[in-house]
Amino acid sequence: MRINYWEKFEEGRFFHIYNRAGGSGKLFFKPQNYSFFLAKWQRLIVPYIDVAAYCLMLNHFHFLGRVKPITNEIKECILQEGTKISKKYLAGRVDYNTFLESQFKRVYGAYALAINKQENQHGSLFQKRFKRVQVRSVPDFWSTFYYIHHNPIHHGVCSDYWGWQHSSIFSYWYDIQSFVTCDEVLAMLDPDPAKALELLKEGHITFAKDYITP
């Protein structure tokens, strides 16, 4: 089955969202770059997409998120954006997918502008089109979830899940990033949070043992 890397965002659906630096360059140069990027993501994306998992690597990133259904609260958030696209969406001239794409472009644009200034460089920081693939089943959700947390191990930057700090795995055990929907994800495993956390730990261990490098 051919994968569509640019599927339209749909309400209530989970998506694996990722992008990387153009060419062989880096996205993150200093420790504070990671927190700056997450702050932009939290401001512009989290109001519309719940984050179940993420991992920021030196030259790319991965997020697993669910598009929030349109509610009056969401419409109010869109109104507060005050952009041309947000106004077009509220006027019924563009769809929700187009609005969300514009929010991602704002994140990438603001981040690229700051990094290019920091590094005294020019040109495109990101690849031009970010990828997003719809997660269509519960097994696919967990496979994507564990893969995202496994990414630092896969790329050889650490030997275990705790060796790379720019990952949402710490949110589940230490509540590092409040925007990660830990409670909702754990509830998918078991109503008892303690038992769910143990199952999550076992899931990570099993994935690491069974993972085969593509």
Image (cartoon, helix red, strand yellow):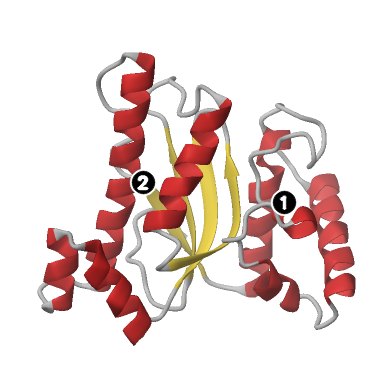
Q: Quadrant of residue 185?
A: bottom right
Q: Quadrant of residue 72?
A: bottom left
Badge number at residue 130: 2
Q: Residues within 10 Å of mark 2 (few under 14, many from 20)?
A: some
Relative to residue 40, is residue 173 drawn left or right? right
Quarter placement of the C terminus: top right
> Which residue is more in the foreground, 110 or 191?
110
Can residue 4 be seen at all in this image of the molecule? Answer: no
Badge number at residue 4: none
> Which residue is more in the foreground, 37 or 139?
37
Q: Is residue 18 above or below residue 152?
A: below
> Which residue is more in the foreground, 113 or 159?
113
Kindly identify which residue carries mark 1.
169
Can residue 167 be seen at all in this image of the molecule? Answer: yes
Q: Provide residue 177's location: percent of width, then percent of height.
A: 63, 54
Kind of residue sitting beneath label 1: Ile
> Which residue is more in the foreground, 140 or 110?
110
Relative to residue 163, is residue 184 drawn left or right? left
Secondary structure beneath disc 1? helix
Secondary structure beneath disc 2? loop
Give the residue at x 53% y 23%.
Answer: 30
Relative to residue 190, is residue 2 drawn left or right? left
Counting residues from the start of the chain, the first of labels 1 and 2 encountered is 2
Q: Is residue 43 above or below residue 67?
A: above
Give the residue at x 28% y 48%.
Answer: 106
Give me the C-alpha separation between circle 1 and circle 2.
Answer: 23 Å
Q: Provide residue 17's location: percent of width, then percent of height.
A: 46, 53
Kind of residue sitting beneath label 2: Phe
Looking at the image, which residue sits at the far top?
Answer: 120
Give the residue at x 68% y 35%.
Answer: 152
